[in-house]
Amino acid sequence: MMPLPTDFLLGTAQSLATVSEAEQRMLLRTGAVLPSPEELQRFMQFVRAVVFPGFYDQRTSSSDTRLFHTGVAVEQIYSILCRQIARGFVFCREQGAESGISALANSLAERFVTELPEIKRLVLTDVEAVALRDPAVSNYGEVVLSYPCIMEMLHHRTAHALYRLGVPVIPRMIAEQAHSLTGIDIHPAAQIGEYFSIDHGTGVVIGETTVIGNRVMLYQGVTLGAKNFQYDSEGRPMDLPRHPVIEDRVTIYSNASILGRVRIGHDSVIGGNVWITRDVPPGSRITQSGPVVEREFADGSGI
């Protein structure tokens, strides 16, 4: 391999190192220590260990040592979160507005720790929902170890708790890690009730302002999305409620798209491949219309 000419190398490096207007708009500041994806992965490993003791950390399998190892994991959760929340605030704020960040980060991390029992309770309802709704499940432990819905919901319920506390950036990073692992894309702000399940899961999208009730089940490819956006005077999309409200005990089959701030009434069943942009009353059964059989086609008609 021949080395690059020095003038060529320096010229290219200088061009790349120059801060562009686009970078300035994105607030890309190389002087700050940024939130670490690797540390957030470690954080989620400890969260997983306290929610499912004995499954992912074999040291906690003994009832005699469970309390000790759980305490160690909680301490690690708090320690990592203090650092990462502080970095998130530094990343999102203008330079010079960093006073008091450490104390704020510590306070938010402590408040998150108090949320862990509720996160665990909610995730365990999701495990039960999957186990009871899928005849292929042999036992609850199989659901914990191998179902993408549970990995996704562990991340989502963690990210959602941090989002509600006002933590910047970190919830989105945790959500996107789960998206990469499972193929399920849930915004951390989405509100999801108890006993939630997703069968298979690949391709599910749940938008920011979605509200989902209790005992709701989705199949793969479901989109709970926005139909359109409202814009402010500067042409920027406004952050308004724009995603569906799904009431209790609704089942939505594969590849259905429910768009806009519509309400799907409780105890409804939404069939596969339908497109819904209007409210659906409680107890509804929505399916595709029957196939239309054409005997012949002329000039592309019917295709």
Image (cartoon, rainbow, N blue to C red):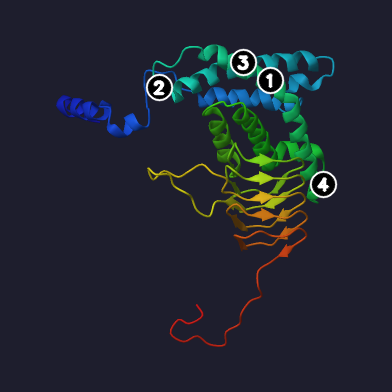
Q: Who's the residue at 79% across and 46% down the image?
A: 137
Q: Is residue 11 left or right of residue 155?
A: left
Q: Please say whether residue 3 is visible from this viewpoint.
A: no
Q: Earlier in the sequence, mark 4 or mark 2?
A: 2
Instruction: Quadrant for residue 121, please give it.
Output: top right
Residue 123 visible: yes
Q: Where's residue 135, x and y in %?
A: 81, 51
Q: Disc 4 or 3, which lies upstream in sequence?
A: 3
* Residue indicated by mark 2: 94
Q: CA distance from mark 3 to mark 2?
A: 21 Å
The amino acid marked with disc number 1 is Val
Per the model, the C-alpha gap separating discs 4 and 3 is 39 Å
- Measured in 3D between alpha carbons, the distance from the residue under mark 3 to the one under mark 1, in whole angstroms, is 10 Å
Disc 1 and disc 2: Cα gap in Å?
Answer: 28 Å
- Mark 2 lies on a secondary structure that is loop
Type of the residue with mark 3? Ser
Q: Nearer the viewer, residue 159 or 190?
A: 190
Tag 1 residue: 113
Confirm or deny contact between disc 4 and disc 2 (CB under 8 A).
no
Residue tagged 3: 107
